[in-house]
Amino acid sequence: MPVSCKSVASIHHLSGAAERAGLQTRQIAFAAASHQGEAVHTGLAREWLASLGLGVFSTTPVMHAARAHDLATLELDLNYILARDPDHVDALNALGYTLADRTRRFEEAAGYIRKAFELQPDNPAILDSMGWVSYRLGDYDMALKYLRQALGNLNDPEIAAHLGEVLWVTGDRDGARAVWRKALAATPDSDVLREVMERLE
């Protein structure tokens, strides 16, 4: 999958190893890596890499901020990257997904994600973000369209978790369980999948 910073999504799984982290968390880490020399005013991006086993950085206070779900610090770093490079697709996707997932600023989130989508329309991380923000906006048909496309492009547990959640909410619980079970068989250690299944079932 392209190194798309979307995985902000799951800052709620930062303590996992890279292979167990959600798509969005991995994408944030990779996006941060691409601009780590610029987003140094907080150092949060580098700490995500370390927490995912993708780097050797160790700024303890910043790590605490990440694990505390410090949305303000995250926004600061991603906006810093975008001020330097407004078309940085990873940062656009990461910021949009984070706002869609962790706030109610859905229209603002959609703006960032749509711009990322214009730049990389086949990127599964961005397709996942398009689906997730559509879901948060209440457009379930579009959410299913984008999430199915994303999962077709990349068999990833976080995308499967999202698709299953939308199927569940729209009443297709058998379909949701089928998606989750298939993804769990491929990635049995996925924290993202287990969280959504425990929350909804």
Image: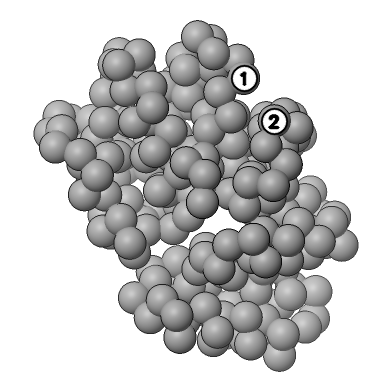
Indicate the quadrant containing the C terminus: top left, top right, bottom left or bottom right.
bottom right
Question: If you read the primary sequence from the N terminus, does the residue marked by circle 2 or circle 1 appear first?
Answer: 1
- Which residue shows up at 28% across the image and 59% down it? 16
Q: Label for residue 119?
A: 2
The residue lying toward the viewer, choosing from 66 and 52, is: 52
Residue 59 pos. (x, y %) = 15, 29
The residue lying toward the viewer, choosing from 34 and 193, is: 34
Q: Residue furthest bottom?
A: 174
Q: Is residue 108 visible?
A: no
Q: Are marks 2 and 1 in contact (CB under 8 Å)?
A: yes
Mark 1 Cα shell of 10 Å, populated few (<14), some (14-19), many (≥20): some
Residue 27 pos. (x, y %) = 45, 44
Q: Is disc 1 placed on a helix, strand or loop? A: loop
Location of residue 97 (image quadrant): top right
110 versus 14 height, above or below: above
- Which residue shows up at 63% across the image and 46% down it? 123
Q: Is residue 153 visible?
A: yes
The residue lying toward the viewer, choosing from 158 and 133, is: 158
Q: Amino acid at mark 2?
A: Leu
Residue 31 pos. (x, y %) = 43, 33
Mark 2 Cα shell of 10 Å, populated few (<14), some (14-19), many (≥20): some
Instruction: Name the side, left or right, on which 150 lies relative to 22.
Output: right
- Which residue shows up at 29% across the image and 39% down it? 48
Q: Amino acid at mark 1?
A: Asp
Q: Which residue is mark 1?
A: 87
Residue 46 pos. (x, y %) = 26, 31
The residue lying toward the viewer, choosing from 72 and 189, is: 189
